[in-house]
Image: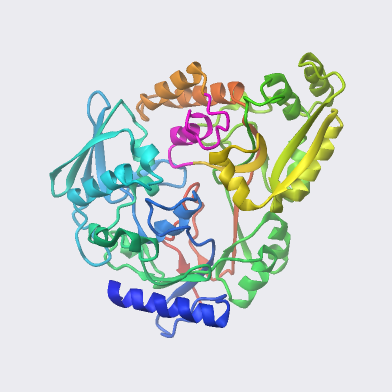
Amino acid sequence: MTSRHSFAALAAVSIAALAFTGCATQAPAVESADTTSLTWGWNLPTSWDPVTSTAGWDTHALALVYDGLTQLDTEGEPVPGLAESWEYSADGTAITFHLREDAAFSDGTPVTAEAVKLNLERGRDQENSTLAGQLRIVTAVDAVDEHTVTVHLDQADYQVPYLFAGKTGFIVNPAAFDDVASLATQPEGAGPFALTEYVPNAHATLEKNDEYWNADHIFIDDLSVVPVADPATAVAGVNTGQWDVAIIPASQAESAESAGLEIEEIKALTVRALDVNGTVAPFDDQRVLQAISHATDRQALIDSTYFSHGTANWQPFPDGYVAHSEELDDLYPYDVEAAEELLAEAGYPDGVDIALTLGEDDTALAELLQAQWADASIHVTLNVQAAAAISQNYVQRTFPFVLDSFSGRQSPLQALEVLYGPEGLMNLGRQTPPELTAAIDKARATPTDDPAYADTIQDAVEVGVRLQPNTFLFSWPRILVHPAGITGIQHWLDVQRWEDVKVED
């Protein structure tokens, strides 16, 4: 395995080579005929350090090199990861994890309770941590013995096993903390792979981590992540071997099928949404928001812009997920007359003028919304912005009405905090009704094995959808394509994993 010093030198040479040649579109070829390799068409992370990475999408790449205390199964439920078991105290304010004795970082160093303690404290306390909000609940961490760690909480919170399956629970080798800035490009973890070469914006090359506790289920020796710069080329790229597995937009699914490729249409925690600042007129009147929802033909949006790959939705979670409430299905059905009546009640008998902010890639969807809403006298001006401006809006809140997407989190309660919490990035008005706070707290304090758990979390979703201004449009799947020789790809609701995936001749 490449040492940290040789890795740094190799990365420097690679970056210099990239600057000289102008671009690198494909990872280096694997030379050994006995080596099983796979190239994945996917996004590279904003940082390889889980504490400073800024995009929820990063979790998929980070899970290649890190493992959490827990993992989520294909249904989104927590199962053992670095911890083989856990239990809560009687009052739910402390959770004790029992680590695997065979868990080790890629350099062979054991994963210990002290390592877990240092990681959770760093995530909570480091100044630039993007995990601090999730870890505020942690009041103390005790390394009870080498393989036992107890996490003390400021309240009963039974969502921790979900939370620790993602970036919040990814455990970094503390040996890297002497130069923590290096983690942005040189991750050191205990996941299924170890990074050996990284060229920003071009590719990442990884090799199987034989120290991984579940290494017997990893059948890929070398895995490369190479972004798909132009989605229209993904199908051709898989056909020619540029990628072995690639994510594609719905518009390319028919082409992939015609090319004889295998298509994996995977239910995911992704939903198209409208971010709304409910403190800004006319969005401060729920009747206006209900009118917009009634004026939206969600199925037509799916058919026209997502090629029928999606499901109409009025809430942040997909059908079949524990937090999905059937009470919200078809909450505001497509009804132009109802929309016009609501606008009149709100004081807009002649219609209302609004501006919809969108990213450059969402023009087709926005134009269809504009046309639909015009039928209900909702007159829309489209405000096209660069992707960076859309991202900055979570903090700056410059635009009160934005066409966006929402990706769920490992914990459904964490997702509700992002959407509706007083500091939630997608809560542009930064207002949370007390009844919603109470509903979220009740769900958080309900053990997940309690028969009442599903009802309490669905109740919180219902309160949020009915009282908050966020408007949901439709859920859409993650679509992967690959040749028939790639087998064993499972349909993970959350992070795409590679256990049991094989490359056959």
**Coordinates of residue 204 in the picture (x, y in percent):** 46, 69
Q: Which residue is the extreme one toward the left?
A: 145
Residue nearer the viewer, 222 or 185: 185
User: Which image quadrant is residue 339 in?
Assistant: top right
**Coordinates of residue 446 in the picture (x, y in percent):** 37, 24
Look at 50% across and 71% down and name the residue there.
Answer: 203
Tally the numbered discs.
0
**Coordinates of residue 375 in the picture (x, y in percent):** 87, 31
Residue nearer the viewer, 272 or 300: 272
Would you say residue 474 sits in the magenta stretch? no
Query: Magenta segment, which residues?
Result: 409-431
Residue 452 visible from this viewpoint = no
**Coordinates of residue 423 in the picture (x, y in percent):** 47, 32
Look at 31% across and 60% down and name the residue there.
Answer: 189
Look at 56% across and 39% down and name the residue there.
Answer: 396
Residue 89 visible from this viewpoint = yes
Residue 228 in the figure: left or right of residue 377: left
User: Which image quadrant is residue 260 in?
Assistant: bottom right
Q: On the rendered image, what quadrant is the N terminus found in?
A: bottom left
The type of colouring in the image is rainbow
Q: Which residue is the extreme one toward the top?
A: 345
Residue 153 in the figure: left or right of residue 328: left
Residue nearer the viewer, 493 or 225: 225
